[in-house]
Amino acid sequence: MRALFSIVLLSLGLSGYAQTAINKIIPMQAGQKVQLEFDYPELIKVTTWDRNEISIQGSVSINGGENDDAFQLSSALSGNTWRIESEVRNLKNLPHRITVMENGKKMVFKNKAALKTHDPNNYTNYKFYSEGVEMDIVLEIKIPKNMATDLRSVYGIVEVKNFEGELTVDATYGAVDATVNEATTGQLKAETNYGQIYTNLALKIAKGEEEDFHTLITAKLGNGPDYNFESKYGNVYLRKSN
């Protein structure tokens, strides 16, 4: 079974800015699992809810809305596991943009000539300057409670809040920012190779390693599902829930 996610183009006339809205519901059955694999969303928010379905909502802007159709989300059921993944198609051939920060404001130009026209006297002296495909992608995902979930993100930050269920998060270049209810969490594992682990939890560490840029902690908190959080190059933030 396969499904392609629906998209709706929204035009924001005041700014001349366009983006694509993502809105998808996937019905789930008891005993199923979910595996999510994303490359370019810069922020992925994940939580659980009481419904027997997965909800994915968000927004996509690629080159100011001109290339939003390059972003695709697809889903497929294999056995008892739903696999949901993203792709920016033909990324290498998409037009590049120039992004700068001017007085704390992000500005995007189609080419160097447009940037020089904007500021002919200072067009190479910005504190931040980058060339590439300009992408702004945010996803908010709701998973049925108590459903085992594996989420892998290459470049984005993964934000976890009020998640009731077994969860593994691997954010390669981004960070993991997780709010944890200590009483309803079983074993907590956090790991990073080149980042840091920050927490305000009252952890009783059962196992800890720190050597050659590698940091690993394992702790037993309370009674509930296990959490595994890893970022190879970014930080892991473990926050106490209110």
Image (tube, rainbow, N blue to C red):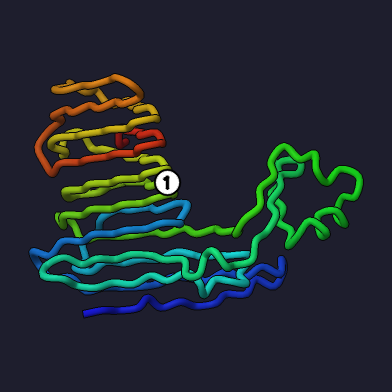
Q: Quadrant of the C terminus?
A: top left
Residue depicted at 12% across the width and 33% down the height:
222
For the N terminus, the quadrant is bottom left
Residue at image position (80%, 39%) is 125
Q: Residue furthest right?
A: 121
Amino acid beneath label 1:
Ile
Crowding at dot 1, Cα within 10 Å, few <14 / some 14-19 / many 20+, comes out as many
Q: Is residue 125 left or right of residue 90?
A: right
144 sits left or right of 6 in the view: left
Kindly identify which residue carries mark 1: 157
**Is 131 located above or below residue 17 in the figure?**
above
Viewer-proximal residue, 203 or 101? 101
- Above or below residue 209? Residue 137 is below
Which of 234/165 is in front? 234
| Residue 46, horizontal then vertical, whole percent | 33, 53
* Image coords of residue 81 (percent x, y): 16, 65
Determine the secondary structure under disc 1. strand
| Residue 29 horizontal side relative to residue 125, left or right | left
Q: How many marks?
A: 1
Image position of 5 (left or right of 168): right
Residue at 36% from the left image edge and 33% from the top image edge: 237
Give the quadrant of residue 57. bottom left
Q: Residue at x 54, y 71 (%)?
A: 68
- Residue 14 to residue 128: above or below: below
In percent of width and height, residue 134 lies at 60, 58
In which image quadrant can residue 194 be found? top left
